Structure formats: C-alpha cells, structure tokens
Amino acid sequence: MSNSIQGVYQGSFMPLNEIRVSPLSRAYTFSDSIYEVIPYYSGKPLCLDEHIDRFKVSADFLKIELDFSVVRKEIEQLGGSVENHTNAYVYYQISRGVDSLRSHIVKEKLIPERFGYAGEVTLSTDPILAKLNQDNRWAHCNIKTTSLLGNVLNMNDAYGDGCNETILIRDNKIVEGGACNIFMTYENEIYTPGLEENILPGVTREFFISSLQKKNINVKQVDCPVSFLDSVSTIWFTSSTRGVQPIKSILNHGYEMDPNDALFRNAKEAFTNSIKDYFQDH
Ligand code: PDD
C-alpha cells in the first residue's frame, strides 16, 4: 500500500498505512458503522453538503452522536491532500466506538471512531458488463452503513463471471446496482426505481435527476419491473465514483445497449454540464 495516501484516525492525520485500529472496534466486530464517499473533481468536492446531510441521517438511524463540523473539516483536509489529481474521492467512516470486550449490547458510553482517507479514482464512461442477481440484502439499504455483505457477495459473484457490476432484483423489480443507482430509457422516457427502504438515496442520483429537470427532461421514479429489461434502450449506473456509466450488455439477459439512444446522450450531456455549472458556483 502506498504511504502517499493520506489518512486520518481520531483526528490524527498520517499516511494510511500507519493507521492502527483495535480489533474491538465495533466496525470490525459488528459493522456497527456508517460511511460516505465524496467525489473530488480537480481538487473540489461535488455535493459535500448533501453527503454530510446523508451522513447525519445514517448517524441518527444508528443513534451515534458526534460533531459533524469536525467530520466536515477532516473530509476537507483529506480532499485537499489530493489537490493535484484530476479525480479523487474521500472515504470517511464513523463507527460507534471500541468495546472493551465484544458485546452486542452497548453497555458503556463509547467514543465514536472516525477514520478516513483520500484515494484516486478513474471515471470511465465506457459501457460495462453487468449480471442480474437476487437482492438478498437486509431491510435498511437506504442507510449508508458498512454492513455490505449482501452487496459484496453479489458484486463478487458478478465479477467472478467477468462482469463489472451486479443489477439487484427483488420481488421481480429492478432495485439498484451493488454500489450504484440505476436508470434506463424505456419507451423514450427515463426511469429509475422510486426510493424505498431497499435503495440507497444516491447523491449522484439526485444531482443527475435535477440536472435533467433543468433541461426539462423528466425522470419517472416508479417501480421498474424486470420485464422492462426486454425493451429498454440503454441502462446506466450512477454513483460518486462512477459518475454516469452505461451498461453494454447483461450476462444473464438478452439486453444490449442501443448505441444510438439520443435520450441517454442528452441526459449524460446534461449531467456533465451541471457539474461544470456546480463548480462555477462553488
Ligand atoms: N457507493 N447504491 C449503493 C448500494 C451504493 O453503495 C452507492 C454508492 C450508491 C450511489 O450513491 P452515491 O451517488 O451517493 O455515491 C447507490 C459508494 C460509492 C461506495 O460504496 O463506494
């Protein structure tokens, strides 16, 4: 691991490979922790306020109390360490704290544990291959916790079959990707599954939808049956580390991306322009 990656642990900044944590961290024993991934474009964060707001929602859900002005400052300082890189991200995680001995029940007052680092990311718009999998995750995927075993197993299953991502299906409906939200053009309109407890309310998803609204392109946020896949023109993922990335084909389905889908092209352009506008204002 490169010692040039900047990390922070409990307020102390140091190279990532010098950070030492306890095995009794509740992040380690129970995934009793939450996280955010904030994208940096040429040294500037995109939608930092929105990421902090979602962090607070996650912290409230887990009943973890801490000062988010400190979290924000640390994220900004980590982001500053990658100023020279074109695209980067800050990963920041908060656990409930470190137990004195493993215990499901939290009997002592714990100090929340803060950990983060800044890494590089390559944003690619090249179409990728995906695989359909059953969504076997827990019931609160709208909360950004590090309890991601369902995502990890499905993503690695897809990767093992030569795919870059999985498309999760539950009750015969399209849900989201393993680490991204999903959109599609269907009968010349853009669709994305409406937000429910089993979908993470992606910051990029929201930014993308508002980029389109500015161009009077409507997005239908409704249930999307798997049968949509038989007739969609283009499917794409959105996330902080992917931006907007189309799916070329699906391993276990006949879908093939329509290379002439003008609606998708317009949507992608609206997103790129909104990012430029955002950085003119921030
Ligand atoms: N993943 N859905 C899931 C399950 C995700 O893990 C993510 C993000 C998204 C998109 O959210 P956003 O647009 O706020 O990045 C949707 C991050 C990048 C990760 O876990 O690394």
Image: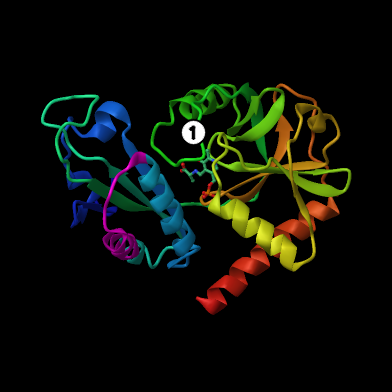
Q: Does the magenta stretch include residue 149?
A: no
Q: Which residue is drawn at 35% across and 40% down?
A: 62
Three-letter amino acid code at the position of disc 1: His
Q: Is residue 152 left or right of residue 127?
A: left
Quick check: 270 left or right of 17?
right
Residue drawn at 48 percent across, 59 percent down = 50
Residue 46 placement (x, y as % from top left): 50, 63
**In the figure, 263 relative to 163: above or below?**
below
Q: Is mark 1 on a helix, strand or loop?
A: loop
Q: Mark 1 CB in 8 Å range of ligand 1?
A: no
What is the x, y in percent for residue 241?
A: 51, 50
Is the residue 230 above or below the residue 39 in the image? above
The residue that appears at 59% across and 22% down in the rendered structure is 161
Q: Tell me, yes or no, whether the highlighted magenta stretch contains residue 69.
A: yes
Q: Extreme bottom residue here?
A: 280
Is 2 displayed left or right of 201 in the figure? Answer: left
| Residue at (65% x, 26% y) in the render | 169
Viewer-nearest residue: 41 or 66: 66
Q: Mark 1 points at which residue?
A: 140
Q: Which of 106 and 115 is in front in this view?
A: 106
| 219 lies above or below 78 | above
Q: Is the magenta stretch mostly helix, strand or loop?
A: helix
Q: Give the range drawn in magenta.
A: 62-77
The percent position of residue 250, horizontal first and vertical second, equals: 71, 29
Task: Choose between 282 and 137: the one closer to the eye.
Answer: 137
Whether residue 86 is visible to the viewer of this picture, yes or no, is no
Q: Position of residue 256 (x, y in %)?
A: 79, 34
Q: How crowded is mark 1: few (under 14 residues within 10 Å), some or many (20 or more)?
A: some
Residue furthest right in the image: 187
